[in-house]
Amino acid sequence: MRWELGGGRAPDPVGLLVRGGPGGTAVGVESLERAAVDLARVAREGAQLGWRAGAAAVDVDVVAGALLSRATGVAAMAGLSDVGVGLTAELAALLELAGAVRAAGAAYRAGEAAVARAVEDLQDRVMAVGGLLAPELLVGCLALHSLGVDVPGLVDRVAFDHPQVADLAGGAEGLVLGLHADPLTAPLLRPAPPHLHDDDLDAFDDAFDDLDYEDAVAVLADSAARWGLLDDRGRAQVTPELAPRPGALALRSLRDLVADQGNVGDGEDYAGHVRVIEVAQPSGSVWIVEVSGTQEWDPRAGDNPFDLTTDLRSMAQQSTVLADGVQQALAQAQAAARVGHRESAGVAAPVLLVGHSLGGIAAAGLASSPRFTARHRVTHVVTVGAPVARMPVPPGIEVLSLEHTRDAVPRLDGRPNPDRASWVTVTRDAYEDGDDRASTVHDLGGYVQTAALVDDSSDPSVAAWRSSSAAFFAGDTHGVAVIRDYAIRRVRP
């Protein structure tokens, strides 16, 4: 169900499908539009030459010369006239080509926008029906559970076989409106969207325009908070660790970067940590900030902010305790930086944000935050199995997103990642034979393998991202990389 008019380029020999970046469709369309402008400019300049040639044919000196030497003068006048007429004809054809090229670019953009609107409308309408039938669906699930059916496991397998089903989650607006239209569920919503009746589905058309995805997710989270669920109130308590978790290494590749997520993502033995790595450069340092995925699935928010509450609040693009904790951790690490490695020539040091799942959402959210980027110069973001397509990451930040075709999580925002020069998405159909669960495809281990394949990829967009991010993977080349870990806790008011 993902709308991708241009799609990605053909998979390479190891099965990677690359979309966006310098080799992406959007960049090609931009090139067409620039070419149309250049063609029109050449036509205008040529037209001036044509008019000058035509004017020269009737110039006073040329006419006077024709009186003295009729044959020569007439030949000169005719030649100049032919140049002017011929050039004008060629320029007319050039202008027609410029118009056609510009129209092609506009048609692509209009077609892409139309497809996007159609898909989002479908998502909203399907989810609206789901909202209207929520009580019945809940009763049905409880009945299946009472009969011994593993409902979560069934959903997990369906998502594996039909990953496009996860795209329907992009219709959060429809779900909220459907829930509000049912008198049984309407009282549960806060704040309430415009009043609707379940017997007038056409009224949803206008309501869809008044409610966007982020607002709808916020309504769901705020409604749950009334019952003590998904409540992110509190502040971040950030405490430096005495030493990093054993096994941390200097990072020299994308594979190393993704694999190191396992060192901070251990929710049992090493819960609630963020890692900040200072990578020395010939002058100054660059910084890597690692944010792990979800560690707590209880909808009741506890002291570990790597939880379901932060998942939904981040998807709603709200400020979170976790985001504030990451900001504090980076600020503490930079304050403790070695003398001479804090900044170069007064310019803030480059920062790369990376995260798997929730960590990817948080990383893209921080890169989209004017408050965060005013303090830290984020230049690169790596997201791994994360739904980040709706995050308004500025075009000046280089983004690399790794996704698995059968992983439902990166599809939960119902939209493909932007196809633009500064955002590269690499997708792989990765799964183990005999394991037909979407949750397994989401595991970090598979993404470590995908990252290793990306390291070896010769795709031009991947190569461009790799070149732009080389400083972060210098390892100990210019001095020992300093690794600092911070525990982040949610402290209730």
Image: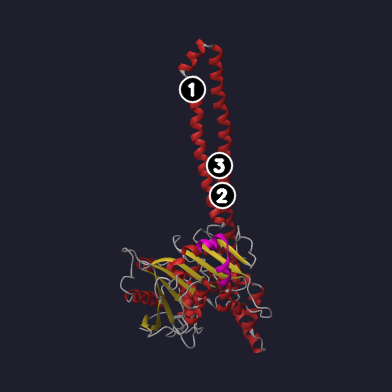
Say which element carries label 3. helix
Residue closest to the eye, 246 or 143: 246
Q: Amino acid at mark 2?
A: Gly
Q: Residue at x 61, y 75 (%)?
A: 133
Which colouring convention does the figure follow?
Answer: secondary structure
- Tell me residue 143's x, y (percent): 65, 86
Q: For mark 1, what is the residue?
A: 56
10 Å neighbourhood of mark 3: few (<14), some, or many (≥20)? many
**Label 1 – label 3 distance at C-alpha:** 28 Å
Q: Amino acid at mark 1?
A: Ala
Q: Residue 287, located in which quarter of the rendered image? A: bottom left
Residue 448 appearing in the image: yes
Badge number at residue 105: 2
Describe the element under mark 2 as helix, strand or loop: helix
Query: As shown in the figure, which amino acid type bears the numbered disc 3?
Result: Ala
Q: Residue at x 66, y 86 (%)?
A: 149
Q: Is residue 37 above or below residue 140?
A: above
Q: CA distance from mark 2 to mark 1?
A: 39 Å
Residue 98 badge: 3
Which of the pair 199/68 is nearer the observer? 68
Sequence-first tag of 3 and 2: 3
Secondary element type, mark 1: helix
Q: Is residue 278 left or right of residue 447?
A: left
Report, in whole angstroms, how far the alpha carbon at label 3 lies from the one at label 2.
11 Å
Instruction: Name the quadrant containing residue 25.
Output: bottom right
Neighbour tally class for label 2: few under 14, some 14-19, many 20 plus, Cα within 10 Å: many
